[in-house]
Image (tube, rainbow, N blue to C red):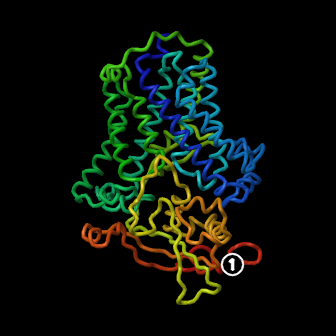
Amino acid sequence: MEWFTSSDYWLSRLVFQRGLAALYVIAFVVAANQGRALIGERGLTPAPRFLARMPFRGSPSLFHLHFSDRFLTGCAWLGAALAAAVAAGAADRVPLWAAMLMWLVLWLLYLSIVNVGQVWYGFGWESLLLETGFLAVFLGNARTAPPVLVLWLLRWLLFRVEFGAGLIKIRGDRCWRQLTCLYHHHETQPMPGPLSWFFHRLPKPLHRVEVAANHLAQLVVPLALFTPQPVASVAGGVVVVTQLWLVASGNFSWLNWLTVLLGLAAVDGRRAARVLGLPEPPPLAAPPVWYEAVVLAAGALVVVLSYWPARNLISGRQLMNYSFNPLHLVNTYGAFGSVNRSRFEVVIEGTDEPVPTADTGWKEYEFRGKPGDVRRMPRQFAPYHLRLDWMMWFAGISPAYARAWFGPLVTKLLEGDRATLRLLRSCPFPGAPPTYLRARLFLYRFTTWRELRATGAWWHRTFVREFLPPVALDRTGGADRPDGPGGGAG
């Protein structure tokens, strides 16, 4: 079948595959570094407890066969090593079937982690990595030209990512329609980056231009992905530029970088190679019949599964970041359908005094990414993802988001659990754990230019209320407290 492949996209595939493998490396390293503390046998939300009540068909995972902290970490490091090999070009140096097997193993390993990750893995970039990784299985390697069908499926995925995000904004918060959401977003987003303060302080007319440009990039440009070249390449380029703007303005895990790779996959690689002065690759052999059959079968599966996300796009009750099947294939995407007007942060404090009094000196725990010390400039972590820091943002919005894991977190800190402490930037009790912990809710806002020059502080914070009253370990090893997060206060 002459139409089956197109050598025009050899460079696009090369960049896409190497970049995707690099993101797989990061995702697996995150799991290796944080998995034990979050979902390990003694984690904040232990995976064994989840597996005991969740059937395999509801959450397919290798960990239904066996789970231990060592096995979880081993799978994560195996995935990171395999992904690093693929990023270095290993998949292009083996037969086609072996390359497909390498990509399939990466997908299966990460699917297994996501499907036991519970609340920590419940975000759109997890499903996006899995869906993209599944399509990469069928994209071939240097021994054959890229299959046209898979290239179109990648564009369909990019369309859903961008168009879905645009629709959820227009249908959601009225500030998107009024072009005013960026008056607040840079300050209230989950984890600001080092430039977020400066983005927030841009003139309001420029913020309105940003929002209008965002609507254009997400609601109009994606339609051009399905047009002939070079228009589709221009559309892919616009996506890349807008995503890099988002990379500069905040920390959103690997979401933006993965979208950049999808945008590059739509670019005509032959034309790009000519512009860059790269030599043409040698003629590629026709793909084997078995490969054509497998790709066609995968394409048919995606077409069938596309019914639900396509219906979701035109629905008045559009779902955001939702998977219609446990394999996380052909999902729906979207982000920031509503924007917070204020930023609330939970600050955890401890003391080593035997009994807290009104004069007790409390010391703060510092997180790696979330705002704490007002003088500490926000850091850039993405595409690396700090899962606990991200969830702490939700805790500041409502204690209900934290009920499943905040109590265990307090207990671990009172115990001085090493795995949990490694998730933090600093612990104010290096010798022995504190006797009491408390949590307080603060209203944070970016300082003004004048305040920054005068105090050196990037944030200004105001105490709002008690989030958790002082607690100590009870005799059973848990945190002895009268209420859950919020301390019973509204």
Residue closest to the eye, 288 or 159:
288
Q: What element carries label 1?
A: strand
Task: Please name the residue that numbered disc 1 is placed on.
Answer: 480
Q: Which of 284 and 206 is in front in this view?
A: 284
Task: Indicate the position of residue 340 as horizontal and vertical percent values.
Answer: 40, 63
Residue occupying the point 78% across, 43% down: 65
Q: Label 1 crowding class (10 Å Cα cut-off): few <14, some 14-19, many 20+?
A: some
Give the residue type at disc 1: Asp
Image height check: is 273 above or below 487? Answer: above
Which residue is found at the position 63% from the left and 22% from the top? 98
Taking 235 as reference, is 321 above or below it?
Answer: below
Front residue of 210/312: it is 210
Q: Quadrant of residue 323?
A: top right
From the viewer's perspective, tell me whether residue 175 is left or right of residue 317.
left
As drawn, 173 above or below 365: above
Q: Residue at x 54, y 47 (%)?
A: 322
Residue 60's x, y, as percent? 69, 42
- Tally of numbered tags: 1
Position of residue 426 measured from the top left corner of the image (x, y, whole percent) = 53, 65
Q: Farthest bottom residue?
A: 358
Residue toward you, 176 or 279: 279
Residue 361 location (% of width, % of height):
53, 83
Residue 57 vertical position relative to residue 470 in the rendered view, above or below: above
Q: Residue visible at 39% across and 52% down?
A: 169
Residue 163 falls left or right of residue 110: left
Q: In which quarter of the image is residue 200?
A: bottom left
